[in-house]
Structure formats: C-alpha cells, structure tokens
Image: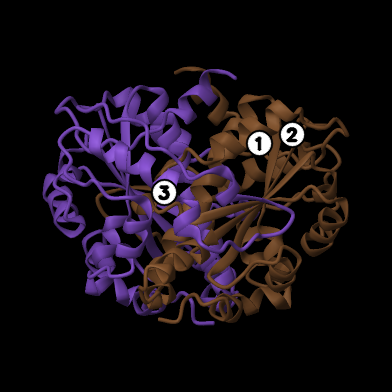
Chain colours: A brown, B purple
Amino acid sequence: MNATIEQLLQHRSIRQFKATPLSSAETDCLLQVAQHGATSSFMQSYSIIHVSDPAKKAALAAIGKQPYIADAAMLLVFVADHHRNAQIASEKGKSTAIIGSMDYFLFATADAMIAAQTTTVAAESLDLGTVFLGSLNNDAQAVIDLLELPAHTFPVVGLAIGHPDQAPQLKPRLPRNQVVFENSYVQQANLVTQLSDYDEAVHQYYDLRAANQRVDHFTTQIAGAMDRRFEKRHELLAIAQKQGFLQY
Amino acid sequence: MNATIEQLLQHRSIRQFKATPLSSAETDCLLQVAQHGATSSFMQSYSIIHVSDPAKKAALAAIGKQPYIADAAMLLVFVADHHRNAQIASEKGKSTAIIGSMDYFLFATADAMIAAQTTTVAAESLDLGTVFLGSLNNDAQAVIDLLELPAHTFPVVGLAIGHPDQAPQLKPRLPRNQVVFENSYVQQANLVTQLSDYDEAVHQYYDLRAANQRVDHFTTQIAGAMDRRFEKRHELLAIAQKQGFLQY
C-alpha cells in the first residue's frame, strides 16, 4: 500500500466544480503528464484538444447534455489520431491504406484512453476532480465539426477537470469473481440472483447519495441501458468510417 | 509536483523481467485497484483474465512473438465485455441488440483501457515494471479461443507485470505543439522537416539504448509502420463482428 494506490482506490467521478481556475503550473503539469503514458509501437497515435473557449465548452456541454461540462476549469478531448502519421507517411511516399484497418483504429483508441486515464490520475493527485465524458458521443459529428478534426481522427472521450464542489460516496464495484477470471472466461447463469447482494449495495449507495433521485439496483440499470435512446449514438460506425477508419 | 506525478513522468515500458514472483498481497492489491477506475455509465463493461497457467502464458507469448510475455510474473488480458450485461438484460427480458452498436463496443473498450492503465500505474507505484501487449492482436481469434471468450467480448490489450530486469532510458515524446491543440485541431504541413530535431532525439535514444539495434528516426518508424505484415491483424473487424460487436 502506498499513497498512489490509496488514491486509485478512492477514485470517484466529480460532476460539480468550483469556479476556481487551475493555475498555469497545474495546466502545464497535466499536459506534460498526459504525454508520458505508453503508446502502441511508440507511434503516439492520439491528440488532445484543450478546449478553453467558453463558447466551445458550452457547445460540448449541450452535446453531452451535462451542464457541468461548461463549468470545468480544464476541458480536454482525447482523439484517436492517425492524421499526423498519415501526413508523415505521405511525405515519405508511403501508402496509408492500413490506417483504414480496425487494428489501427483500435490501437489509436487505446493510446487516447491511456493518455486520458494518465491525466485523470495526475489530476486526482493534485486534489482535482475529474469526470470522463463519453457523452460527447451523443453527437460525434458535431464534436468533429466543432473541433475541426480532420480525416483519420476520431474523438474518443472527453475529460472535465476542476476543483471538486461535491464529495460523493465511493461506488461499490462488482464482486471480483464477476470481473476477474483465472485463465479462462467463466460464463455465469442466473446473474440477477447471484448479484442480489450487490444490487442491494448499489441501491443503498444511490439512496445515500446526496441530491440524487436514482435509487436503482445495478441489474435494473444494466437492463435499462439496453433501451438507450440517443439516435446519433447509432451513427458512430458510419462517422468513424467517414473519418477514414474501420474500412475493414 | 508530487510522488504520483513524478512516477507518471518516469514511465518506461519494461520488457525484461526477473524470475521473482509477485507476493499474493501484491497480486491482490493490483486486482483490487484494477476495479476502481471509472467506467462508462457505471456499467463496468470489461473483464480481466488473469493468465497464470504456464502453458497459456507460453501460447500468448507465441501469439505476441514476444518471449518476455511468458516471463511476466503477472499476465493480464483486459477484455471489452458486454457478455455479462447481455446475460443480465436477457434474464430481465430485454433485447440486447444495442450491444451490436459501435457505441457499445467503443465504451467497453474504453472501460478495459481505463482498468489496464489504472493497473499499470498501481504496479509502477510498487516498483514493478509493466508493458502493454497490443501484440496479442496478431491473432485475436487464437486469444479468444485460448481464453474461452464468449459472445460480446473482445480482448483489447494484454499487460505483463513483473520485477524489472532492465533500466531503459526515458523515451523522448513528440513536441507538445504536435499533440496538444487549443480549441481546434491544427493540420500541419512539412511534418518531416518540422520534426527533424525530434527525429534526432529519437535516433539518439535508440543509439544509447542498451542491447538494441534499432537506430531509426521517428518519422522513418511511422512510415515503416504503414507496411505492417501481420496478416491476421487485418481480420480484426471480422473477428469483432463475429463476437457480436460492430454490426452497425
């Protein structure tokens, strides 16, 4: 056990921020750390858009349907990026057809996520709060247009960072035996029954959580998620393909 | 600046491990931390296969064409997983068609990567070395078969962890102005020329690196990556679709 591990075990997403800005030293530090995670084949196939323009922050908050996005002291969008690689390869006379493979999309996405989680850990070590914004995929095309993302790029996730103005409880995680398997995946039957204690723990968590009306059980949430209604989220594959990804 | 940030700035991938095993307390700690990252909509749409069977470790080393995979004290495969969610939803009488969307594949992949990077940071804080294994995608179908991964799962990345038996130099990262953009993506021209100083820094890094023959420049590596020859890496989309993902 050490301070880093204690911090990682205490992770909570923060969805309410104070108006206090980050110092320029903090901003600089986070951007420096963001570049120091591992990347696939050392290609560094990601980019980060630091969104500081209040109008663009408001636009992203509208896309994500989460007003706190606009309140974040620092707002980053992590982008899977083979545009830079394609430019370099083209200048060297190489075909860039392979960037259309799922392989290349997947590892650029992985690079973007490693950078995003590295930034999250660094921010939390500075007593800042963070929340990932998968919600930007409510309208990925609007994000692409807003941030002027060129061919061979795709916005994977947003990250809002700021001084926490809430202190949520720690969310109970699934029992380890449902998530970690030894040597082979173990398919489970009667999961709703098996997870009844966990359902109750999640229910209590929501019941205790201040200013939150959701008192769901875990399995009810999972079942409910199958009805997700954001129509543009069903266009992501077409959008990624238009960006030159996932051709095969 | 603090100890966590100093550690993150010092990240290096480790590809040579001592034979020393991890203590059961270390193993337990890492698996606990792995579950404490953020997940999309709190669905926890990932699983971890802890591969301890020497025969399976050897098989994964052969797939990755990296003998050190078999030497890792702890070997994990992070899996995008909607199998558990599909089972829960089915038990509650819900259609699971939405799992075929790119949206659901993408956020499960993000969940797997957040867990993987969280584990990496925790391991490094315990003075362990780590290396991501994108190489398992050399033959994703073989990984699926070996680990008995069911429908609605996909192996995103491996992670080898152990006591370091090498002390590599820190790899120089791309200049920030090539990776971080303010408010809008900035497309660059003449990148090979712009990156000439960086090319030289990478060249010197490889030149100094012990026991390594590669003395490439960065832009030469990027151009060379366009010729990647692992044929089965071109089958990833078909494999993911066979697993029930990326139908639309």
Inter-mark Cα distance, 1 to 2: 7 Å
Of the pair B45 and B241, the residue shown nearer to us: B241
Q: Chain of mark 2?
A: A
N-terminal label among 1 and 2: 1
Q: What kind of residue is marked 2? A: Pro
Looking at the image, which residue is at 49% across and 46% down? A114
Residue at mark 3: A39
Residue B45 visible, this angle: no
B148 displayed left or right of A189: left
In contact (CB < 8 Å): disc 1 and disc 2: yes
Q: Which mark is residue A12?
A: 1
Q: In the rendered structure, which amino acid carries the disc numbered 1?
A: Arg
Q: Which mark's residue is nearer the viewer, 3 or 2?
A: 3
Which residue occupies the foreground of this view, A146 or B108? A146
Q: Are marks 1 and 2 on the same chain?
A: yes
Return the residue nearer the eye: B153 or A121: A121
C-alpha distance separating marks 3 and 1: 26 Å
Q: Which mark is residue A168?
A: 2
